[in-house]
Image (cartoon, rainbow, N blue to C red):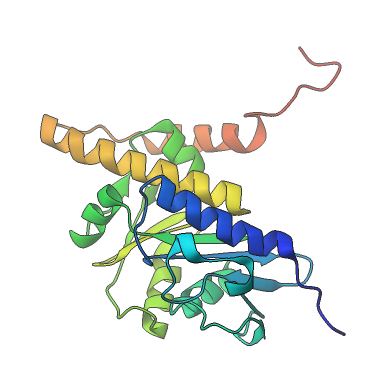
Amino acid sequence: MKLEISEKYKRLIVDTGRELYKQSLTIGTWGNISVLDPETDLVYIKPSGMDYNEINLKDVIVLDKKGKTIEGFRKPSIEMPMHLSIYNARKDVGAIVHYHPIYSSVLAVTDFSLPGICEDFVQIVGEKVLCAKYALPGSGELAENAVASLGNRNAVFLLNHGTLCVGKDMKEAMKVCYVVEKTAHIYILSKNVGKCRVIPEEDIKIMQDFAKDAYGKQNEPNER
């Protein structure tokens, strides 16, 4: 049976790449983006070595979760193994953004973890962001290291490399990108000012439960 290719997901790759560029979260060809179609289990991914502003629908590569090209004439991103490893390890992930913003990259090259210092961070990203062990770009070892350090959180730093964020869909993955970079900026500035307070673990759990169960949801008709 032939799997249906969705233009919607191709468009998502094109638009997200341009948004990253517009928001100065990456430059040139650096980083990569992918999205998973939950109906077909096909992965749509950025082509290797192409400027985000030059990518069109025809340039997006469509793969199965084993890495076989289903559609596309270009070479997929060299970080394809990392993307596929995460999709196979995390069934809750539907989109991945690997980017190279300034402040997150500062922490990534210094082998720092980013603690839970802001409430939006702990609700959206997790209690902290760890830094994965170094491995060569595009290698299976980097994919393994990223999966291990990502755990059940929504972001991970890649040592001497950049940052990777995940979400249930592209909208959520991009939200994680914005919050991680903002929090990294705050963390670096706060360390220059003085002591940086980390949110207590018990409060993090309460805020995460609130975000999952209540935040942004409408009341039922009989609720006030």
Q: Residue lying farthest front?
A: 54
Residue located at (49% from left, 57% from top): 17
Residue 149 vs 145, above or below: the answer is above
Q: Is residue 197 left or right of residue 99?
A: left
Residue at 18% across / 59% down in the picture? 110
Question: In the shown orientation, is residue 210 left or right of residue 24?
Answer: right
Q: Quadrant of residue 78?
A: bottom left
Q: Residue 63 in the image: x percent, y percent?
A: 64, 79
Q: Which residue is more in the foreground, 189 or 31?
A: 31
Q: Is residue 78 visible?
A: yes
Quarter of the rendering containing residue 155: bottom left
The residue depicted at 62 percent of the width and 29 percent of the height is 215
Determine whether 191 is above or below 58 in the image.
Answer: above
In this rendering, does residue 166 appear at all? no
Q: In the rendered image, which quarter is residue 202 located in?
A: top left
Q: Residue at x 23, y 67 (%)?
A: 160
Q: Quadrant of the N terminus?
A: bottom right
* Residue 106 vs residue 78, the one in the foreground: 78
> 86 or 26: which is nearer to us?
26
Counting the numbered discs, the total is 0
Quarter holding the C terminus?
top right
Measured as percent of width and height from the top left, residue 142 is found at: 37, 77
Up-down relation of residue 151 to residue 128 (above or below):
below
Front residue of this view, candidates 48 and 123? 48
Residue 79, percent from left and from top: 44, 76
Q: Position of residue 74 (x, y in %)?
A: 54, 82
Q: Residue furthest bottom?
A: 68
